[in-house]
């Protein structure tokens, strides 16, 4: 499987991982990106318990060079922790490359092997104490009951649908409890800043990790508006920020569009998660971009679609109301059009 960056798992890595899974004599398998491939960069046997070995993990990492480390757990030893180490002082290109490729790593090696993941920006994030806090956070009870959280998510989704209820009773039957505040890892913040500071036509594609309710950087590429529709994910929801140096408005400028794409084949629980989080993601991006004083501006009106392939220049112009808006009215003041959301599964009898 190839990443949006074009980087793939090398045959050497595929073989190395297969070997360590079968032999069970490896605690850490370090992985690097070299020559546009994911390659093994060292295998390290266990010297004690998982906690004891985690305290030694920093000795195989460098202060300013990103790396992936696959960590075998103790209970059970058939399961793995995927560590994504991207230090704050690494080169910007390396940060983007490693962030954009991490999903490809686990999916290509077999997602079922990995029961947990950890993103670290410093070696101190990878100690036994830091990992214990990570596990405690995952296991901690939520401040609301499951029912209260479910109802809050349903209400948020209904507000997103413009008060139309969005299959209300079916949502209550199928919703997996989610929150509406999606977490922003540091690499996402940096990617938004880089997008806003650019000059050309660029696409920043984000997904959500359902387990942590955190944004994940899927890809950041140059992309013109005619290729936008085919560059979005075809079978699962996503958020996209598209920087468009347009000349449609009376004052040409670089406009950053926020696109919420939810294909009809997306599972219901993912539709609800992305729908509930879209407003907070847009608001957070607006705060980041406005703080930069960038010449690029963010349109507050979202573009929403259940068929990514329909998105082209004419679709964008229509959705933003640029064809009919007055020459003095900013894009942000145009009335929002309701999103034709995909139907949920039929009611069970």
Image (tube, rainbow, N blue to C red):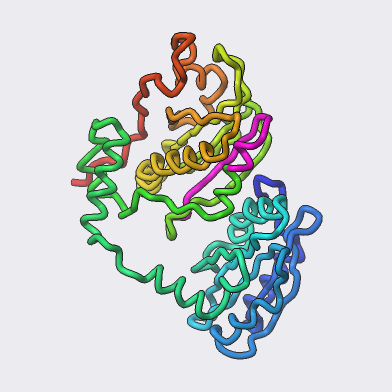
Residue 222: image x %, image y %?
A: 68, 35
Up the image or down, 71 lies above or below 327; here it is below
Up the image or down, 141 lies above or below 257; here it is below
Can residue 234 be seen here? The reply is no
Residue 199 counted in the magenta span: yes
Can residue 125 be seen here? The reply is yes
Q: How many numbered marks, from 0 up?
A: 0
Up the image or down, 152 lies above or below 114; here it is above
Res 158 quadrant in image: top left
Which residue shows up at 75% across the image and 62% down it?
11
Q: Nearer the viewer, residue 270 or 316?
A: 316
Res 66 quadrant in image: bottom right
Q: Nearer the viewer, residue 309 or 161?
A: 161
Residue 195: image x %, image y %?
A: 62, 38
Which residue shows up at 35% across the image and 32% down it?
341
Which residue shows up at 66% across the image and 81% down it?
26
Which residue shows up at 26% across the image and 55% down it?
149
Toward the right, the furthest residue is: 35
Toward the left, the furthest residue is: 349
Toward the bottom, the furthest residue is: 48
Residue 5 counted in the magenta span: no
Residue 101: image x %, image y %?
A: 65, 54
Residue 23: image x %, image y %?
A: 65, 81
Region in magenta = 193-209
Horizontal arrangement in the rendering, residue 29 relative to residue 151 (left or right): right
Q: Nearer the viewer, residue 112 or 100?
A: 100
């Amino acid at each position: 499987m190839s990443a949006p960056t074009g980087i793939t798992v090398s045959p050497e890595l595929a073989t190395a991982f297969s070997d360590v899974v079968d032999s069970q004599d490896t605690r850490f398998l370090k992985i690097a990106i070299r020559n546009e491939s994911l390659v093994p960069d060292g295998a390290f046997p266990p010297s004690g318990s998982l906690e004891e070995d985690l305290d030694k993990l920093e000795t195989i990492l460098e202060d300013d060079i990103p790396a992936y480390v696959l960590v075998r757990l103790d209970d059970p030893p058939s399961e793995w922790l995927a560590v994504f180490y991207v230090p704050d002082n690494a080169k910007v290109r390396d940060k983007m490359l490693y962030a954009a490729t991490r999903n490809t790593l686990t999916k290509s090696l077999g997602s079922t092997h990995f029961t947990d993941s950890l993103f670290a920006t410093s070696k101190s994030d990878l100690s036994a104490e830091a990992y214990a806090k990570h596990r405690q956070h995952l296991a901690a009870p939520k401040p609301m009951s499951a029912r209260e959280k479910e109802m809050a998510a349903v209400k948020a989704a209904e507000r997103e649908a413009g008060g139309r209820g969005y299959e209300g009773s079916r949502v209550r039957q199928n919703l997996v409890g989610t929150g509406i505040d999606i977490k922003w890892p540091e690499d996402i913040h940096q990617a938004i800043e880089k997008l806003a500071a650019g000059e050309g036509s660029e696409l920043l594609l984000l997904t959500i990790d359902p387990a942590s309710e955190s944004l994940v950087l899927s890809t950041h590429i140059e992309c013109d508006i005619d290729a936008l529709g085919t560059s979005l994910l075809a079978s699962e929801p996503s958020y996209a920020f598209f920087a468009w140096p347009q000349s449609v408005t009376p004052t040409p400028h670089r406009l950053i569009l926020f696109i919420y794409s939810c294909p009809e084949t997306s599972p219901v629980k993912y539709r609800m998660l992305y729908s509930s989080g879209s407003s907070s993601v847009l608001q957070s991006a607006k705060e980041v971009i406005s703080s930069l004083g960038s010449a690029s501006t963010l349109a507050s009106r979202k573009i929403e679609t259940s068929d990514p392939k329909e998105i082209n220049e004419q679709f964008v112009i229509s959705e933003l109301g640029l064809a009919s808006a007055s020459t003095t009215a900013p894009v942000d003041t145009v009335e929002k059009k309701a999103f034709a959301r995909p139907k949920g599964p039929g009611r069970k009898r």
